[in-house]
Image (cartoon, rainbow, N blue to C red):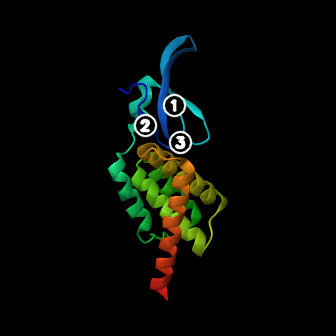
Amino acid sequence: MFKLGDKVVYPMHGAGVIETMESKEILGEIKSYYVLKMPIGEMKLMIPVDNVNNIGLRNIIEKDMVEKVYDILKQAAVLNDSNWNKRYRDNLVKMKTGDIFAVAQVVRDLTYRDREKGLSTGEKKMLVSAKQMLISEIALSTDKDGKGISDYLDNIINEDALTQEDNVL
């Protein structure tokens, strides 16, 4: 059970803070909801309290684990040469887990593929979504603003691209 003020991750949406709990009557049944305030985009989500285990709501990672996320982004990309539809499905499975390390792999691999061969429209949207998920969780874990985190992630990824090019030359 979570409480007000907890920083949590809602898979496929990113990290947020439980701002309030509300009860709503829907179809004649009163249910309790967590109201999450998302740091990116100022969006609010309502999540049924009795459904949190099924959707994978979890606490954000500890601040000391953020470096592991950065390490994943620095690793060589894993290129999946299957068609875009298969790659998309494989990456979607990773993102649905809500595991930040799996999401970091998606960001790393799609960013590299975008640079090398380009992405389908669906994969471009997925990359934006995955990056937002990373930014939101890291921002809440480190108590830093999303723009600074975004810039830092871009630097890591661009630095990695230069390193990978040097290894090829």
Q: Quadrant of residue 62?
A: top left
- Amino acid type, residue under disc 3 in the picture: His
Q: Nearer the viewer, mark 2 or mark 3?
A: 2
CA–CA distance between discs 2 and 3? 11 Å
Badge 3 density bin: few <14, some 14–19, many ≥20, Cα 10 Å: some
Residue at (40, 49) in percent of width and height:
99
Q: CA distance from mark 3 to mark 1?
A: 11 Å
Disc 3 or disc 1, which is closer to the eye? Answer: 1
Around disc 2, counting alpha carbons within 10 Å, would you say few (fewer than 14), some (14 to 19), or many (20 or more)? Answer: many
Closer to the camera in the image, 96 or 116: 116
Please state which amino acid type lies under the numbered disc 1: Leu
Mark 3 highlights which residue?
13
Q: Is residue 81 visible?
A: no
- Position of residue 93 measured from the top left corner of the image (x, y, whole percent): 46, 51
Earlier residue among tags 1 and 2: 2
Q: Which numbered dot is residue 36?
A: 1
Give the residue at x 62% y 41%. 41
150 horizontally vs 122: left or right: left
Is residue 70 rendered to the left or right of residue 132?
left
Percent of width and height locating residue 58: 39, 38
36 above or below 133? above
Q: What residue is shown at x 51% (from left), y 60% (from top)? A: 152
- Counting from the top left corner in percent of width and height, residue 114 is at 59, 68
Q: Is residue 76 above or below residue 58?
A: below
Above or below: residue 139 compared with residue 17: below
Q: Position of residue 129 (x, y in %)?
A: 57, 51
Mark 2 residue type: Val
Furthest-top residue in this view: 28
* Residue at the bottom extreme of this rendering: 169
**Can you tell which mark lies on residue 8?**
2
Q: Residue at x 38, y 53 (%)?
A: 66
Q: Is residue 14 visible in the rendered structure shown here?
A: yes
